[in-house]
Amino acid sequence: ARPSSVRIVEVGPRDGLQNEPGLVPVAAKVALIDALAEAGLDVIESGSFVSPKWVPQMADTAEVLKGISPKEGVRYPVLTPNLKGLELALAAGVTEVAVFAAASEAFSAKNINCTIAESLERFAPVLDLARARGVAVRGYVSCVLGCPYQGEVPVAKVVEVSEALVAMGCYEISLGDTIGVGTPDKAKAMAKAVADNIGIARTALHFHDTYGQALANVLACLDLGIATLDASVAGLGGCPYAKGASGNLATEDLVYMLDGLGIRTGVDLEKLAAAGRAITAALGRTPASRVAQALAAR
Ligand code: HMG
Ligand code: MG
């Protein structure tokens, strides 16, 4: 059955901005994160402690975190691919992080320069140190419905990597359709296979909207009872190491649909859309979100 409320994990400041061709000023990132918190989002992925050579757009994450005005009850997680990333995150005062693996060997090599097995070995000490410091760790699995480099990805591999991350101590697994190739029945079957193994409460979904399927995929998976959904304000986003990965599911579109379904999110759509307009204006564009465009045209 569909959940009565959904937690939205806003990934715009990270997944959205990591792919921008130009560098986005720290002040614009800070304003975005604070505006998202004001709009009622209570989990805002705010950056990454990754190699600045690999993803220069996220090199300012510590400064961004210093600049925001943390709101009571809001979590501001960041990505940490290795122990060095976690140490930098801890030094910046972070209390929640995410590690990221893939269900595709080819993507793992391109994105984090190691095999899937090596990535899991690399995450073990990250999880250990995080546990010792009381830091919660989310796990991502990329390419759950297809890979830009190897094509088909078996559901069994998605389940295997998800289970490995949970066994290591990740409290939740976000299933990433990195290049947005999934369609509803396949998305639902994949999500069900994972949820049957790690539990519905640990299962989150992370759809990119490259082929315009993200909302349809969410709707199909909601019927499983999954209640944690990632989205990116204004539909910003893409992964620099996934050719052709366009924006994530737009948070405005997701909130509008959930509002219409009577599923609570705690997010104020008008304030959210304003946050999306402000960041896209700073980037010299308008929001990719259809809902944001409709609201602006009234
Ligand atoms: P590597 O080159 O194999 O790593 O990269 P290394 O350990 O050999 O280090 C190379 C250099 O990077 C060294 O510096 C390290 O100190 C430095 P040098 O000695 O050359 O001056 N370094 C770091 N610096 C800062 N922070 C760190 C760090 N680690 C090493 N944490 C590595 C391996 C994993 C570091 C690299 O491949 C990397 O940073 N990859 C990140 C790629 C990335 O961020 N991709 C986007 C996020 S994933 C995504 O978008 C998908 C998702 O949205 C879900 C979905 O949609 O599917 C989550
Ligand atoms: Mg992503």
Image: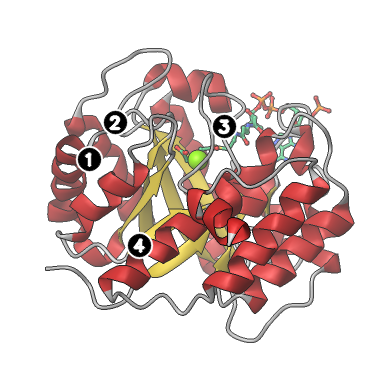
The residue sitting at 21% across, 62% down in the picture is: 200
Q: Which residue is mark 4?
A: 257
The residue sitting at 61% across, 63% down in the picture is: 273
Query: Viewed as shown, does residue 82 lie left or right of 26?
Result: left
215 or 203: nearer the eye? 215
Q: Secondary structure at mark 4?
A: helix
The Cα atoms of the two marked residues, 2 and 1, are separated by: 7 Å
Q: Quadrant of the C terminus?
A: bottom right
Amino acid bearing label 3 = Cys
Q: Which mark, residue 239?
A: 3
The location of residue 49, given as percent across then percent down, is 70, 46
Dot 2 and dot 1 residues touching (CB under 8 Å): yes
Circle 3 crowding by C-alpha within 10 Å: few under 14, some 14–19, many from 20: many
Amino acid bearing label 4 = Met
Circle 1 crowding by C-alpha within 10 Å: few under 14, some 14–19, many from 20: many
Q: Which mark, residue 187?
A: 1
Residue 22 visible in the shown view: yes
On screen, 16 above or below 21? below
The residue sitting at 36% across, 72% down in the picture is: 259
Q: Secondary structure at mark 2?
A: loop
